[in-house]
Image (cartoon, helix red, strand yellow):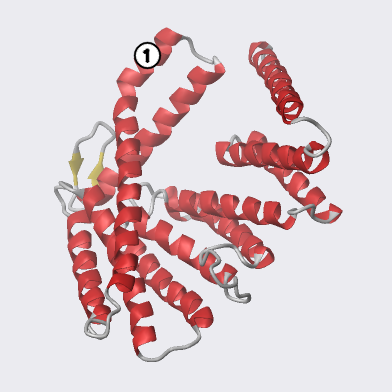
Amino acid sequence: MQVCDLSGFCRTPALVACNTMRNVLAEKVSEQISQWGHRGLIDDQLLALLKARYRSDEAMLGLLLRWLGFFAVWLLGASVIGFIGLSMGKAAEYLVPFVLLAFSFYMWRKGTRMAVDPEQRHPLTGAVLVTVGLIAAFAALLALYALLGGSSMRLAGPILMLVIAGAAFFTAYRYGLRWPLILGVLLAFHALGNMHRYGGHGSYFLGIQDERLTFIVAALAIVFGMWHEKVLERDLNRREVGFGQVYVVTGLLYANLSLWFLSLPRGELIAVLLFSFACIVQIILGARFHDGRFTGFGIVFLSIDIYTRMFESFWDDLSKGSFFLIAGMAAMIAGVALEKRAKRFVTEPTP
């Protein structure tokens, strides 16, 4: 039987799962403490005491390290993709796919070993190497397709994205890693969004080309993520703790982006109303179930929606200074009203 206590001492062969559980709990507790302090539910003295008790500074350090890892993956992945263009001379073009395949397998293998090391000496570095290895595999398959005389990159690109997404999902669930899961989700979204329409010469290859299909997939991802959290992640000893968060957040992002894009430029009234209604529903659901993800995305995209409508209706009729002055004052008035409403709700006695 695996035993793991919350004080940090772990007696189990599955040390990685235990460390993952503690990290997720620390992040959630630290985030909740910060929200209490921001909303004025606790005073500064209690806020400092809770931060010291639950070491929220270490959680912030972990967040910083994850963002540094994200930029490392971005830069290394860009360099891998750029390597194809720099090496496509007649003498080297036949070697590029195979060199990239060998490089991707080495990075994937080395990264998985580092990520599942029982002593957890380099977990973040291992996750970065695994993700870069998967990106390199995608680049290698593209180069191999071009080498074999493939002419329909319009179809091959999305299909290869789905292939690498499948490999990323397998890696994520096999080794309990969230970075490959994020990559797999992003590749799946963009592969499906690009499947039916060509973006045009020089267009952004990873752009959302089919907003309606992307919205449907995003909605399914949200539902699956919620089910993942409620059912699969009830056992905190599972390595997949936190995976549902990836599905929910990514689904909310792409669902809102798809609805926003459908309302541009000067979209149909039904598209504008649907986007506004979806934002309001997210705020209501977030408040009802105390889920900051829905509330946050709802508020952000409702603000974007209001700004977009103001831009479309008044940008050409008002001076730029007047436009931003009105928008800023409206935002300040709304913020003050919401703050007063929140304080009155907190101070009201519970029956």
Residue 178 position (above or below residue 307): below
Asked if residue 284 can be seen in this view, the reply is: no
Q: Tell me where residue 298 sits by quadrant.
A: top right
Which image quarter is the C terminus in?
top right
| Residue occupying image coordinates x 83% and y 41% | 313
Tell me residue 144's x, y (percent).
33, 84
Q: Closer to the camera, 176 or 1?
A: 176
Residue 311 position (above or below residue 196): above
Q: Tell me where residue 86 sits by quadrant.
A: bottom left
Tell me residue 22's x, y (percent).
30, 39
Count neighbours of disc 1 (C-alpha within 10 A) and say few if under 14, some if 14 to 19, many if 20 or more: some
Tell me residue 34's x, y (percent).
45, 24
Tell me residue 202's x, y (percent).
53, 68
- Count the marks: 1
The amino acid on which the numbered mark 1 sits, given as a three-letter code, is Ala
Q: Closer to the camera, 11 or 95?
A: 95
Q: Closer to the camera, 308 or 317?
A: 317
| Residue pointed to by mark 1 | 48
Q: Closer to the camera, 331 or 172?
A: 331
In the displayed structure, does residue 252 sit left or right of residue 309? left
| Residue occupying image coordinates x 50% and y 85% | 152
In the displayed structure, does residue 76 sit left or right of residue 36? left
In the displayed structure, does residue 143 sit left or right of residue 314? left
| Residue occupying image coordinates x 44% and y 49% | 234
Asked if residue 101 can be seen in this view, the reply is: yes
Which element carries disc 1, helix, strand or loop? helix
| Residue occupying image coordinates x 36% and y 91% | 148
In the displayed structure, does residue 129 sit left or right of residue 240? left
